[in-house]
Every structure is written in structure tokens, then in C-alpha cells.
Amino acid sequence: MKTATELADLGVSNSLTQRYIKEGWLVSVGRGAYAKTHGKVTKLGALHGMQYESAHLVHAGGRTALELLGYSHYAAMDDRRFFLFGPHKCKLPEWFRKRFQGADIVFSASSFLPFSLATSFTRYDAGAFAVTVSAPERAVLELLYHVPAKVGFNEAFQLVGGMGTLRPGIMQELLEQCATIKVKRLFLYMARESGHRWYKDLEKDVVDLGSGKRVIVKGGKLDKEFQITVPVLSEEVLF
């Protein structure tokens, strides 16, 4: 899939684009977006087009990024729920919304994490193109942003449990700049319970964890250290 801007940068003028459409080589998938005739427009391909237009501000994050980077038992197939993130007040282009109308896409326009921290992003090679996705340290906080409404607590806990190679320096920066108290407390709780070696390298005393209790899941138990109500973890979840 290519946007009009990308085609123009490749030397394909608007008139030539219209000729390709007339001759059946290209089809319009929305205003300013085109694909090869009979070609499949995937979510990753569409994301590549969006990023070409918006300097990578919209990116695959949370569970989707973790799936792409190999941290999940599930592959990031096109029929899986697709998590996208962008800055506060950012909107997805009209062509994307129309093309994937009814698809299971969760878009969060939020600046609860800084977009200026370059090391919190990475590139994912999709074969014919590459897209910007959240690095594991950013993705895990985005994952917890959606617990429990769109991501289950147990699933998130198991994903955090498999992240033994997080970079504590980048994790520290993100935690200190994260604007969501729930996410920070939940991450530190899950990291502690998972027993990761990098957990002891985090300077938890300089992370603003707010005050008062937070209920993550109703009917659970209160964790006294982080003052969050969470489910009672079963052996199946722990191991």
C-alpha cells in the first residue's frame, strides 16, 4: 500500500496514478491511499502508509508490539486485536478508518508516555517495508494501560513474566515520565511478583506513585506495597 505522498516521492505524479487506476494496476483504498489491484491491504501495510505521512507519530504498541517482537505465544496476525497509539488529540486518517471500519482496532490518542524518548521505539521488518513499533519497555506500559478493560489481568501478568531482558535504564526513564499512576503501580507489582533480575536495578523511590488505593480488579486482594487491588494469583498464572 502507498499513500499519494509516497507515490509522489517515488516519482509517480497524480496524473500517472490516475492512469494506473484506469488501466487496472492500482485501486484507491481511500482518499490519498492506493494499493495494487487484487493486493491485500494489511494493517501493518496501512500503518506503514500512515507513518510515511505523519513522521511515525502513530505506532503499533502494547500487546501488538509485544507480539511482533516475539514476546507472546500469539503471532501478530491480521485478525488479532490491533493496538495503535498516537499523541493526545491525534486522529487516524479518514482512509484508514474507512478501510478498516469494523475491524478490531484499538487506537489510543494519549501522551501518558513521552514521544521524545527515541530509545523507547524500534523498527519492525515486515519484509517489503518496515514500521516503527514500541520497544519492549514502552510496549509493556502500553499493555498495562489497557488492563483490565481491553487486556485481561492474567494475560498481562504472563506477558510481563516473560520479559526477563528489559533494559532497566530505559524502563526507569519511562516510569519517571509516565503520567498514569495505575500503569506504574501495576508494572512494578507484576515485575516484583515475576522475580526479574532487573527489578532490583529500578530506582522505585524516585517514581511518583501517587497516593491512595487503586482498584485494578474488583473483589481482589490489596497489595500493601503498591496499594492496588489485584486478583489472587493462581499457580497456573505464576508458573
Image (cartoon, rainbow, N blue to C red):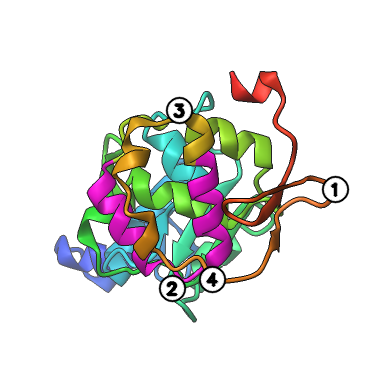
Q: Judging from the image, what secondary structure is the residue with disc 1 in?
A: loop
Indicate the quadrant where residue 55 lies: bottom left
Q: CA distance from mark 4 to mark 3?
A: 27 Å
Q: Are marks 2 and 4 in contact (CB under 8 Å)?
A: no
Percent from the top left, x then y, of residue 238?
Answer: 61, 24
Q: Are marks 3 and 1 in contact (CB under 8 Å)?
A: no
**Callout 3 environment at 10 Å: few (<14), some (14 to 19), or many (20+)?**
few
Residue range of the region highlighted in magenta in the rendering: 167-190
Residue 219 - label: 1
Depth check, front residue: 177 or 140: 177
- For disc 3, the marked residue is 162
Q: Judging from the image, what secondary structure is the residue with disc 3 in?
A: loop
Give the foreground label among 3 and 1.
Answer: 1
Rendered position, 193 above or below 174? above
Asked whether 38 falls inside the magenta stretch, the response is: no
Percent from the top left, x then y, of residue 49?
Answer: 35, 59
Return the disc, 2 or 4, that comes first in the chain's sequence: 2
Return the disc, 1 or 4, that comes first in the chain's sequence: 4
Residue 210 - label: 4
Rendered position, 222 above or below 164? below
